[in-house]
Image (cartoon, grey):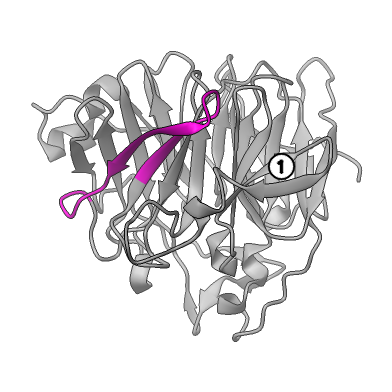
Amino acid sequence: MAAVLMNFKVQAQIVKHEVFATVEQSVGNIAFTANGDLVYSHHPFFNPQFRVVKYNAHTQTIAPFPNEEWNTPRETDDHYLSNVLGIRNDENGIVWILDMGQRNPITPKIVGWNTVTDQLERIYYLPETSVVPTSQPNDLIVDTKHNVFVIADEGIGNGGDGSTAALIVVDMKTGKTRRLLQGTRSTLPENVPTNINGKPLAINGKNLLVGCDGITADKNFEWLYYAPLNGSKLYRLKLEDLLNESLTESELDNRVEIYSDKPNNGGLSIDDEGNIYLTAMENNSVAVILAKDKSIHNIVVDEYLLWPDGVSYNHVDGYMYVSAAQVHLGAVFNNGKNLANAPFYIFRFKPLAKGVPYR
């Protein structure tokens, strides 16, 4: 599986990649324990038994994370994981799991599990004031400078068309939530369908247009970067503006900047030099937007990188990890027939500069 570098000139460097693991179920987003072990979501499109698992690289085995009980729905309480894609870790070894709450309908929440003490850290709920019927909280950043989570809500839950996409801010100290920029220029999807091998991604003949999806922040938590999956622009906003409750919605929207062009994309990550990595599912690649000139280049291309989803940096080994989720081959997009096949791949590669952990 040869790495491909297209129209790219950075010290004549070639970005190599490798298969880190092959597994039996579709991998969504990837986080890391305090010692660098992988914890990842099984993509919810495929209705997995275990929503989140930990991968043991030494034995090449997986186990439900944080345990089987948390992966077992029940009617007696909501201390279980219902429907998970977004997952991140912080510098304290806490893995934060974004539960969309859709598969076994419960209040959406963020579950923090401390991988140092192997104990529940805290649960943050997303009440009705912060979600709407078509919410699909997809991904998040863990901002330990401002003590907030910022969530990208795609707006495609329960048949939504992306028009209610938004950002959700959760205060780590108080649990207070705010829903911001719903249906604005930077969260709405554009009418740019996802095309893979010449086939638009559609459900029942209607193109799927996904709103605010990928999200990341720079190493100093100064800028928040985010974008709709279906759209040609990457946006950025100062976190201090996002958190300024004195700004009106219109004033906040006016402070959102168009940062660069981009392809349709899923996950986002960033390195110390401000280069932004994104998963470009239409051509089986990870691309980078260079900080120096905002030019876009494919740096990892692989025929087995089918629907690259999350991309995240491992603070222990210095690699960026990316999953190949095969989402476009799922039954919902193929007249009820699941065309996805094991094995599913987890790739890794060294970024152009040291990555920024935790987002």
Relative depth, front residue between 109 and 86: 109
Q: Which residues are magenta?
A: 110-130
Is-magenta flag for residue 215? no
Viewer-nearest residue: 295 or 313: 313
Name of the residue lying farthest toward the front? 76
Q: Residue 305 placed where, x, y %? A: 76, 52
Look at label 1 and name its amino acid: Tyr
Residue drawn at point x = 38 percent, y = 64 percent = 102
Q: Is residue 118 magenta?
A: yes
- Residue 330: image quadrant is bottom right
The residue singled out by tag 1 in the image is 55
Residue at image position (25%, 54%) is 183
Residue appearing at x 38%, y 19% in the figure: 144
* Residue at 66% from the left image edge and 38% from the top image edge: 287
- In the image: residue 189, left or right of residue 40: left
Q: Secondary structure at mark 1?
A: strand
Numbered disc total: 1
User: Relative to the observer, which residue lies in front, 57 or 136?
Assistant: 57
**Image: 208 above or below 348:** below
Give the x, y percent position of residue 268.
54, 37
Q: Is residue 126 left or right of residue 217?
A: left
Residue 149 in the figure: left or right of residue 340: left
Instruction: Evaluate whether residue 27 shows in this view.
Output: yes
Give coordinates of residue 303: x percent, y percent: 83, 55
Reply above or below: 232 against 235.
below
Q: Quadrant of residue 17?
A: top right
Mark 1 neighbour class, 10 Å CA radius: few under 14, some 14 to 19, many 20 or more: many
